[in-house]
Image (spheres, helix red, strand yellow):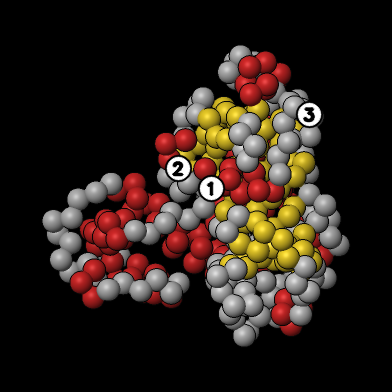
Amino acid sequence: MAKNKSIKITDEDYNRISSAAYDIQNYHNGEIIYTSNRQKLYVIDYKKTEKGLNTLTLVSHEDYRNSHEGKHPEKIQNAIIAYRGSEPISTNQLKETIKETNQRGKREELIKELEKKGINIPAEEDGSSFDSVTGFSEYANEIIQDWLHMDTSYLVGKKPFDDGTENQAIQADQYAKKIHKDFKNADIQVTGHSLGGSNASYAVVMNDFIERGVTFENPNIYENLPEDVKARALKGDFRSRLTEYINLNDGLSLLNRDAAEVGKVKVMYDEALPNGVQNNSLPDEVKMLGLGLKHYGNQLLISHYLLKP
């Protein structure tokens, strides 16, 4: 957050913030999220849509106080938008999802698409005995919107985000524009993990007013971009404003990394796995990266950048 010198946001803090975006309990104005050095960030705006977009906007304690808890948004100097990633699939959520889709006649479609993503459904959970299952239909919609519509149709299927439909990426862009309009004097930054990282990256490339984006373990969105934005990416226009941390042990993180990179990419891997790289199909330029390492949470960070033309 550039203007307010009383608070410093590190990449580790962005990681914390992107994780906090998963917690639905944080989707209330006034909720507090702490940085790594225990400084407070306040939720000052949020949005949840039927298309599965969930996003928070955070400000510093100073901005929260000076704006009278958001009543005077023109006094806010800095704002961080955090986009929530794909809904984690627990057993109960999976059961509820399959029940919901069964009612719509789409159970088999869901099972096939989940299996394509490498999500194995045990035989007893194939939907045949779920008649008595109860739960929240919101979870079902989250999983359908995240995994089927966005992760599978767009990121795996490489459909352009601007295909004329109302999808999460388009809504992420619209939300960033709204925050910029409402907080007209604020520097805007974005973050997100997984699908949330892809939404954040899209917001960066579609809006030059966004000062910085830091994302984690998200697929590369180059193939989803409009042609004019692809041309800018090829020239490296976004690398000074967008940093993407990818994990060599995470399949979704490596998705579409054979295409041109949009931002500046930092590579990390899980230190619990030998040598980090478990995928022999990785591009040679990834395998050949030097191992200048430092600790980053529960992972190790490779200090080199992966930059593709």
Q: Is residue 262 left or right of residue 110?
A: right
Residue located at (83% from left, 70% from top)? 309
Q: Amino acid at mark 2?
A: Asp
Query: Where, quadrant-wise, is the N terminus in this rendering?
Result: top right
- Whichever of labels 3 and 2 marks the residue nearer the N terminus, that label is 3
Which numbered disc, 3 or 1, marks the residue that appears first in the sequence? 3
For the residue pair 129 and 14, the one nearer the viewer reads as 14
Above or below, comparing residue 261 to residue 174 in the picture: below
- Residue 299: percent from the left, percent from the top? 61, 62
Q: Amino acid at mark 3?
A: Lys
Query: What distance separates the C-alpha of mark 3 from that of mark 1?
Result: 24 Å
Mark 2 and mark 1 residues within 8 Å of each other at the beta carbon: yes
Q: Residue at x 82, y 52 (%)?
A: 240
* Residue 168 location (% of width, % of height): 53, 50
Q: Quadrant of residue 37?
A: top right
Question: Is label 3 in a helix, a strand or a loop?
Answer: loop
The amino acid sitting under disc 1 is Ser
Tag 1, which secondary structure? helix
Which residue has dot 1 on it? 19
* Outermost residue, bottom side: 280
**Res. 23 mark:** 2
Q: Nearer the viewer, residue 228 or 204?
A: 204
Q: Position of residue 27 (x, y in %)?
A: 47, 34
* Callout 3 touching callout 2 (CB < 8 Å): no
Quarter of image, res 223: bottom right
Secondary structure type for disc 2? loop
* Residue under the image location 60 percent in, 20 percent down: 70
**From what the image shows, is residue 63 above or below residue 205?**
above
Q: Residue at point 79% right, 34% down?
A: 2
| Label annotation for residue 5 | 3
Q: Note whether residue 24 is visible.
A: yes
- Picture coordinates of residue 234 (x, y %)? 82, 65
